[in-house]
Image (cartoon, helix red, strand yellow):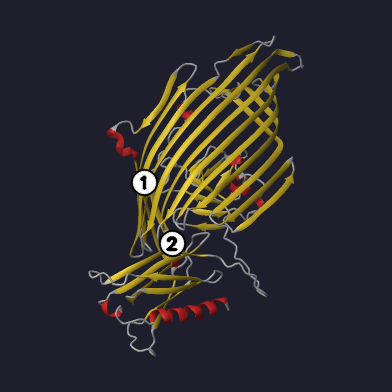
Amino acid sequence: MKFTLLYVQFIFIGIGLFAQSGTFKQITNGTKVSITGVIADSITNKGLAGATIELTYENPGATAINSISYVKRNAIATDGGKFGIENLPYAKKYSIVIAAVGYETTFKEIFLSVQPPEDTKTVIKNLGIIKLHRENKMLANVTVRATATPSMQFDVDRKIFNVEKNITAQGGTAVDVMKNIPSLSVDVEGNVQMRNSTPQILIDGRPTILTLDQIPADDIERVELITNPSAKFEAQSAGGIINIIMKKNKRAGLNGIASAGGGVPDLINGNVNLNLRQKKFNLFASGNYNKSGGVAREETFRINKSNDTITDYFNQSSENERSRKFSSVRFGADYFLDNNNTLSFTQSFNNGNFNNHEIQNQQYLDSLGSLNYTGLRTTNGTGTFARSSSRLSFERRFDDPENKLTADITYNKGSRSNQSFVINDFYNADSTIYMPSTKVRNDGSANDKQFIAQIDYSNKINKDKRIEFGLRTFYANSSSNFGTYSIDQVNNETKLPLSNDYKYTETINAGYFNYANKWKSLTYQLGLRIELSKFDGTLVDSNFHFGYKFPDGFNDLGYALFPSFFLTKPLSENQDIQFNYSKRIRRPRFWEVNPFVDINDPLNI
């Protein structure tokens, strides 16, 4: 009824406005008008395919009071919400009515100058993005069933796994999420591999200093697996990329969710998510707590040989009781400057502490398998970490939602510490003391800082053609101090050469360009990326410098170019075959260029 009354009123207003003198009609000189635009959701900015557009304008042929003085033209928005109405006579004013199921009807008036340009036979009027607001009404006797988002989707260069509805991962961490993704393998320590390689972990497309067990599963919306990244992504991701997309609710009003869980051994978790959308602001916040414990048991049986002759045996069994407590807070805001520009800020804090108590039994046997002596190793360790991440983002959407510019600055900061006390006791086969006890104290701490700035532009020129390019700079600063101290029988400490005190900086500057199009039935994408990197490290105690520069000189510049190529051929409506190629690089990490021997214990170097 509301729509009908407004529409009738609109018709009469249009009749009154169009019943004017013929002067304007006589000076249009046959100029035609095309009106284009995009219909989009006011919250998600996604185009609304199927929206109807009804346009009314003055009839240039009307000559008498009883003639039809207005004409109506209709159009339907296509994919992406785009619409266009062409070959319209030149008029001072056009009025349109835009409607879509579930959205409020929108009215818009378009005014042109009194006289069309003399040198232009076609005037194109682009209305830009017209955003429709969702209609909040209670409908009687109507049942609405939402279709669930598929758990797995395929894109041109990635697989997308939707985590939000995965109940098996709720209350856990990102490690629990990865265990439920078929393409990944996760070992007992939580290390993830993709295609037998270690992938790079990103959060919202940007590097992170968080480990997977420090990311709450309840904050994850979806996980993107990119097995062969294009030129848009870092060249060092030889093992592929796992891009974790965090939740950001934009529904109108105040809404949220809370959950809690528990289990054995010693499992407790809780999560709270809140979101408030009011006018030009969207505020969101979440908090998580995760506690876990358990006992890990391990056995080792070693046979030592010399020239294929057994010299002795070594057996080892250990029992490690571990406890972990993690907590995190994440909050932020989106400020909608206007229909096309959005400014966003996100802040997160992650903290945790863990401790372990390990008892290790050792047996030293001779070549015949007879027991020589035994060892008892006791370790008590504690550790803490504190991480934070800040991001400021800007997004500019142009007339087409597929045409956008994004820029963001990310600053990651973290610190960690760990301490352990180790006692080694040795006994003869008859339980008498074999040798005096040895005591070792380990004390470590580290600080990490990362700064990332990136700007990207993408434009889908038409259904098949797309270009994108961008620039990126990455800077990391890290320092670590690990001390190992031997304690004698009167508790005097001596610093051992196993101690390691280092610091390093890493810089990577990059730029990329991608071009995608279609030739006959083949869809292709060409890309090129250039990366310049530098790594400088120092062993503080000895003032020893290590690192690399890549490329090292102008002659090696070609090594810093990373092309990529994707080609897709549809075989049928439901089948495609794809070929892709990309050049990658695996940069050595700091422990691979650090001239230091890592010793977990005297028997594991």
Give me the residue at 42% from left, 71% from top: 109
Amino acid type shown at disc 1: Tyr
In the picture, measured across the screen, residue 400 lies left or right of residue 325, that is left
Specify few, some or many for label 2: CA neighbours under 10 Å numbering under 14, 14-19, or 20 or more.
Answer: few
Residue with the most extreme top position: 490
Looking at the image, which is closer to me, 488 or 40?
Answer: 40
Spatial CA span between label 1 and label 2: 27 Å
Residue labelled with disc 1: 512
The answer to whether residue 261 shows anywhere in this view is yes
Counting from the top left corner in percent of width and height, residue 328 is at 63, 41
In the rendered image, the vertical position of residue 492 relative to residue 472, given as above or below: above
Looking at the image, which is closer to me, 381 or 7?
Answer: 7
Residue with the most extreme left position: 119
Residue labelled with disc 2: 576
Give me the residue at 45% from left, 70% from top: 108
Which numbered disc, 1 or 2, marks the residue closer to the eye? Answer: 1
Counting from the top left corner in percent of width and height, residue 142 is at 65, 74
Give me the residue at 36% from left, 63% from top: 462
Looking at the image, which is closer to me, 65 or 74?
Answer: 65
In the picture, measured across the screen, residue 345 lies left or right of residue 114, that is right
Q: Quadrant of the N terminus?
A: bottom right
Counting from the top left corner in percent of width and height, residue 207 is at 49, 41
Amino acid type shown at disc 2: Asp
Which quadrant holds residue 508?
A: top left
Q: Quadrant of the C terminus?
A: top right
